[in-house]
Image (cartoon, rainbow, N blue to C red):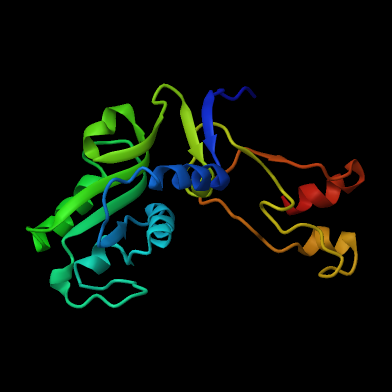
Amino acid sequence: MKYPMMCIQAFRSFQDAMRDLDEWVKTFPERYDVIVGIPRSGMFVASYIATKLGVPLSTPDDFVRNEIWFTCVLKKPTDIHKILLVDDGVGRIDGQMKQNFYKIKTVFPTLEIKRASLYIYKNAVEAVDRYYDYLDDNHLNREEWNLLHRKYGTLGVDMDGVLCHDWDPARYRTYETFLQTAEPFMIPKFKIDFIITNRHKKYANETSGVA
């Protein structure tokens, strides 16, 4: 069977994102009273920014309920004048960024809201006020933090250390016991196409049995 091939222009790992975030935050020209992250993936970007800047953190739904995580007490709600609404990536003008912007703006019409995304597609430039880098809309772009939730094209994954835990003699009496009872580790929310494993050929029957 032949599977279609897709060109991966860029794979963004957590390490890449942390490096880019460090550089990005240095360029912020202004301070914010609260960082608001768009769940799910936008929260890890927003949390990192909030920690680096020492600024309170919230989500859009929590913020409109006046719920904020903070390390220092805000004197009163009127102390909040400017927030940074953050996502990890924006690919559409009418997507989550726009929806959450108006969700907050409807409740707090006088609040100054700046929109930011670590990565964007070029067609979504108008959706944000600041961003760090482009994604190439002519190629497949993948982020490590979304691998379990989104599938594009044909996908093959490793077994040990990915779908199940690695072999650990402290946890399993024998290697054969591990093959039969290994506990799940990272389970995708979609069907995968291949399992790629470096297990010895003599364990093929046990491996195909659990697969």
User: Height in image: 65 above or below 190?
Assistant: below
Q: Residue at x 25, y 43 (%)?
A: 95
Q: Quadrant of the N terminus?
A: top right
Q: Position of residue 183 (x, y in %)?
A: 71, 64
Q: In the drawing, does residue 176 fall left or right of residue 157?
A: right
Q: Residue at x 70, y 56 (%)?
A: 164
Instruction: Name the outermost residue toward the left.
Output: 110
Q: In the drawing, does residue 207 fall left or right of residue 102?
A: right
Say whether residue 41 is visible. Answer: yes
Q: In the drawing, does residue 184 fall left or right of residue 128?
A: right
Q: Position of residue 56 (x, y in %)?
A: 32, 67
Q: Residue at x 66, y 53 (%)?
A: 163
Q: Position of residue 30 (x, y in %)?
A: 26, 50
Q: In the drawing, does residue 42 fall left or right of residue 100?
A: right
Q: Position of residue 147 (x, y in %)?
A: 53, 45
Q: Residue at x 7, y 58 (%)?
A: 110
Give the quadrant of residue 5.
top right
